Image (cartoon, rainbow, N blue to C red):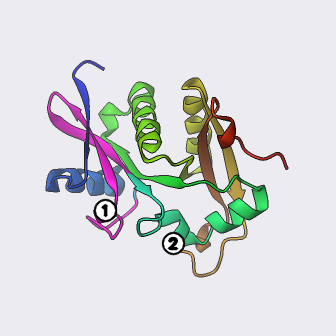
C-alpha cells in the first residue's frame, strides 16, 4: 500500500488510543478501556498512511510486568508444560487493530514482520497471541509465508479466575523462527 509507514513508540498519542478503542468497539463489538496497565510497559507499533494513524499493535515482552496472556489467563504455564516448549523468553502481540478500510493481508503481514524483527532485538524466542480460531489460522498462514514456524494451541481448561473463562476454548498462536534450531518446538 503506497504511503504506508510504521513507527515504534513507547508513548503513543491519544489519537492512537482513541482509534484503537473505537475500532474494538465499533468494528469488533468489544469494549476495551482507552488504556490499560500493559500500555505503559509495552512497545507500540503505529501504522500510518500518509502520516495519519490507521492502526497499530502492542508488543509486551516478559518479564517486564508479565504479559497479558500470562497474568490474565494463567495459560502460558499450561502451554509450556503441556507442549514441552523450550524455556526461552517470550513476548505477546496484543491489541492489534486496523481501520476497516485499511485491513489488507499486506498490512497485517507487515505488522507481523515488524513484530518479529522487534522480538529479535529483545532476544526473545516466542511471540504469543490470543486470537479467535479463524484469525489464528490466517495468522499462521501469514507467518508461514514470512518463513516463521507457528503452532496453534487450543486451551479448553481455562482457570476460573481468567477473564476469558466464559469462552470455554482459547486459541493461542505461538510464533518462532524456522532458521534458529534453538527456537524449534519440542516434539511431543
Q: Is residue 25 left or right of residue 7?
A: right
The residue that label 1 is drawn on is 39
75 vs 45: above or below: below
Q: Out of 116 and 88, give the one closest to the viewer.
A: 88
77 w.r.t. 15: above or below: below
Q: Are marks 2 and 1 in contact (CB under 8 Å)?
A: no
Q: Position of residue 114 (x, y in %)?
A: 39, 35
Q: Residues within 10 Å of mark 2 (few under 14, many from 20)?
A: some
How many numbered circles are shown?
2
Q: Which mark is residue 7?
A: none
The residue sitting at 33% across, 58% down in the picture is 25
Who's the residue at 35% across and 55% down the image?
24
Q: Nearer the viewer, residue 87 or 36?
A: 87
Residue 139 at x, y = what percent?
55, 38
Is residue 107 on the magenta stretch? no
Q: Residue visible at 71% across and 53% down? A: 85
Q: In this view, does 29 lie to the left or right of 19?
A: right
Q: Which residue is drawn at 27% across and 65% down?
A: 35
Question: The N terminus appears in which quarter of the rendering?
Answer: top left
Above or below: residue 167 compared with residue 14:
below
**Residue beneath label 2, please?**
72
Q: Quadrant of residue 11?
A: bottom left
Q: Position of residue 46 (x, y in %)?
A: 26, 42
Report the side of 3 relative to 29 (left or right).
Answer: left
Q: State the SS at label 2.
A: helix
Q: At which x and y percent is residue 88?
A: 61, 54
Q: How crowded is mark 1: few (under 14 residues within 10 Å), some or many (20 or more)?
A: some
Q: Give the range drawn in magenta.
A: 30-58
Mark closest to the chain's N terminus, 2 or 1: 1
Question: How far apart in space, not on screen, are marks 2 and 1 (Cα)?
Answer: 15 Å
Secondary structure under the numbered disc 1 in the rendered image: helix
Amino acid at each position: 500500500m503506497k504511503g504506508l509507514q510504521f513507527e515504534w513508540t513507547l508513548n503513543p498519542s491519544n489519537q492512537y488510543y482513541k482509534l484503537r478503542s473505537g475500532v474494538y468497539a465499533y468494528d469488533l463489538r468489544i469494549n476495551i478501556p482507552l488504556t490499560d496497565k500493559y500500555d505503559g510497559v509495552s512497545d507500540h507499533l503505529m501504522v500510518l498512511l500518509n502520516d495519519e494513524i490507521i492502526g497499530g499493535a502492542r508488543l509486551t515482552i516478559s518479564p517486564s510486568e508479565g504479559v497479558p496472556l500470562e497474568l490474565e489467563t494463567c495459560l502460558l504455564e499450561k502451554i509450556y508444560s503441556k507442549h514441552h516448549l523450550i524455556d526461552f523468553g517470550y513476548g505477546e502481540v496484543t491489541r492489534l487493530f486496523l481501520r476497516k478500510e485499511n485491513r489488507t493481508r499486506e498490512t497485517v503481514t507487515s505488522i507481523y514482520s515488524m513484530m518479529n524483527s522487534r522480538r529479535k532485538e529483545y532476544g526473545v524466542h516466542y511471540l504469543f497471541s490470543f486470537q479467535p480460531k479463524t484469525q489464528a489460522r490466517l495468522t499462521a498462514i501469514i507467518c508461514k509465508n514470512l518463513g516463521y514456524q507457528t503452532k496453534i494451541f487450543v486451551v479448553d481448561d481455562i482457570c476460573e479466575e481468567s477473564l476469558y473463562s466464559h469462552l470455554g476454548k482459547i486459541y493461542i498462536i505461538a510464533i518462532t523462527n524456522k532458521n534458529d534450531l534453538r527456537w524449534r518446538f519440542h516434539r511431543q
